[in-house]
Image: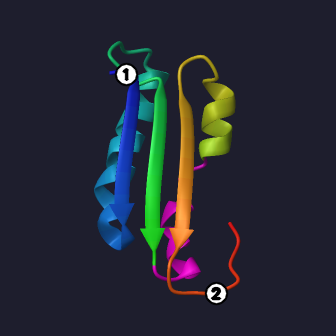
Amino acid sequence: YENLVLVAGGIGISPFIAVLKDIIHRAQEEKDCLPRKILLVWSVKRSKEISLLSDMNTTSISAFFPKVLNIEIQAYVTQESGILL
Protein backbone atom coordinates (compact mmCIF):
# COMPACT_ATOMS: atom_id res chain seq x y z
CA TYR A 1 0.00 0.00 0.00
CA GLU A 2 1.10 3.56 -0.64
CA ASN A 3 -0.39 4.89 2.61
CA LEU A 4 -0.14 3.46 6.10
CA VAL A 5 -2.07 4.79 9.11
CA LEU A 6 -1.10 3.55 12.56
CA VAL A 7 -3.22 4.43 15.62
CA ALA A 8 -1.95 3.68 19.12
CA GLY A 9 -2.61 4.54 22.72
CA GLY A 10 0.02 4.64 25.46
CA ILE A 11 2.46 1.73 25.51
CA GLY A 12 0.58 0.28 22.52
CA ILE A 13 3.06 2.27 20.42
CA SER A 14 5.74 -0.41 20.94
CA PRO A 15 4.76 -2.73 18.07
CA PHE A 16 4.40 0.25 15.74
CA ILE A 17 7.93 1.44 16.57
CA ALA A 18 9.13 -1.99 15.44
CA VAL A 19 7.07 -1.68 12.24
CA LEU A 20 8.51 1.79 11.53
CA LYS A 21 12.06 0.60 12.14
CA ASP A 22 11.51 -2.29 9.73
CA ILE A 23 10.13 0.04 7.07
CA ILE A 24 13.10 2.38 7.49
CA HIS A 25 15.52 -0.55 7.27
CA ARG A 26 13.80 -1.79 4.09
CA ALA A 27 13.95 1.73 2.61
CA GLN A 28 17.69 1.90 3.32
CA GLU A 29 18.10 -1.37 1.43
CA GLU A 30 15.93 0.03 -1.40
CA LYS A 31 13.40 -2.81 -1.14
CA ASP A 32 10.10 -2.67 -3.00
CA CYS A 33 6.55 -2.79 -1.62
CA LEU A 34 6.99 -0.07 0.98
CA PRO A 35 4.37 2.44 2.07
CA ARG A 36 5.30 5.92 0.85
CA LYS A 37 3.29 7.96 3.33
CA ILE A 38 2.99 6.96 6.99
CA LEU A 39 0.77 8.63 9.56
CA LEU A 40 1.15 7.65 13.21
CA VAL A 41 -1.58 8.92 15.53
CA TRP A 42 -0.70 8.37 19.17
CA SER A 43 -2.55 9.27 22.35
CA VAL A 44 -0.81 9.30 25.74
CA LYS A 45 -1.95 10.29 29.22
CA ARG A 46 1.17 12.25 30.18
CA SER A 47 3.67 14.19 28.08
CA LYS A 48 6.60 12.27 29.60
CA GLU A 49 5.40 9.16 27.72
CA ILE A 50 6.38 10.79 24.44
CA SER A 51 10.01 9.96 25.23
CA LEU A 52 9.24 6.45 23.94
CA LEU A 53 9.81 7.91 20.47
CA SER A 54 13.16 9.46 21.37
CA ASP A 55 15.16 6.88 19.40
CA MET A 56 13.07 7.53 16.26
CA ASN A 57 14.49 10.60 14.54
CA THR A 58 11.78 10.96 11.91
CA THR A 59 12.87 14.44 10.82
CA SER A 60 16.25 13.21 9.62
CA ILE A 61 14.64 10.04 8.21
CA SER A 62 12.17 12.03 6.14
CA ALA A 63 14.93 14.41 5.00
CA PHE A 64 17.16 11.48 4.01
CA PHE A 65 14.42 9.65 2.08
CA PRO A 66 12.27 12.54 0.79
CA LYS A 67 11.09 10.64 -2.28
CA VAL A 68 10.79 7.32 -0.49
CA LEU A 69 9.24 8.01 2.93
CA ASN A 70 7.01 10.67 4.40
CA ILE A 71 6.47 10.01 8.11
CA GLU A 72 4.08 12.18 10.11
CA ILE A 73 3.53 11.70 13.83
CA GLN A 74 0.57 13.26 15.60
CA ALA A 75 0.82 12.88 19.39
CA TYR A 76 -1.99 13.85 21.75
CA VAL A 77 -1.69 14.25 25.52
CA THR A 78 -5.06 13.54 27.13
CA GLN A 79 -4.67 14.05 30.88
CA GLU A 80 -2.56 17.20 31.21
CA SER A 81 -3.74 20.72 30.59
CA GLY A 82 -1.86 23.48 28.81
CA ILE A 83 0.47 21.15 26.88
CA LEU A 84 1.16 22.00 23.24
CA LEU A 85 3.10 19.63 21.00
> Upstream in the sequence, badge 1 or badge 2?
1
Q: Where is residue 36 shown, x and y percent of the image?
A: 47, 23
What segment carries the magenta color?
45-57
Query: Mark 2: which amino acid?
Result: Ser
Please name the residue that numbered disc 2 is placed on: 81
Q: Where is residue 62 shown, x and y percent of the image?
A: 62, 33
Of 77 and 17, nearer the camera is: 77
Of 47 and 84, nearer the camera is: 84
Q: Where is residue 28 shown, x and y percent of the image?
A: 48, 24
Q: Is residue 16 left or right of residue 30?
A: left
Residue count near mark 2 (Cα–Cα under 10 Å), binned few <14, some 14–19, many ≥20: few
Q: Is residue 12 left or right of residue 35?
A: left
Q: Residue at x 33, y 43 (%)?
A: 19
Residue 55 visible in the snapshot = no
- Disc 2 is placed on an element classified as loop
Please name the residue that numbered disc 1 is placed on: 34
Does residue 54 belong to the magenta stretch? yes
Q: Answer with the quarter of the image where residue 84 lies.
A: bottom right
- In the displayed image of the protein, which residue is found farthest to the bottom? 80
Query: Mark 1: which amino acid?
Result: Leu
Q: Residue at x 39, y 52 (%)?
A: 17
Indicate the quadrant containing the N terminus: top left, top right, bottom left or bottom right: top left
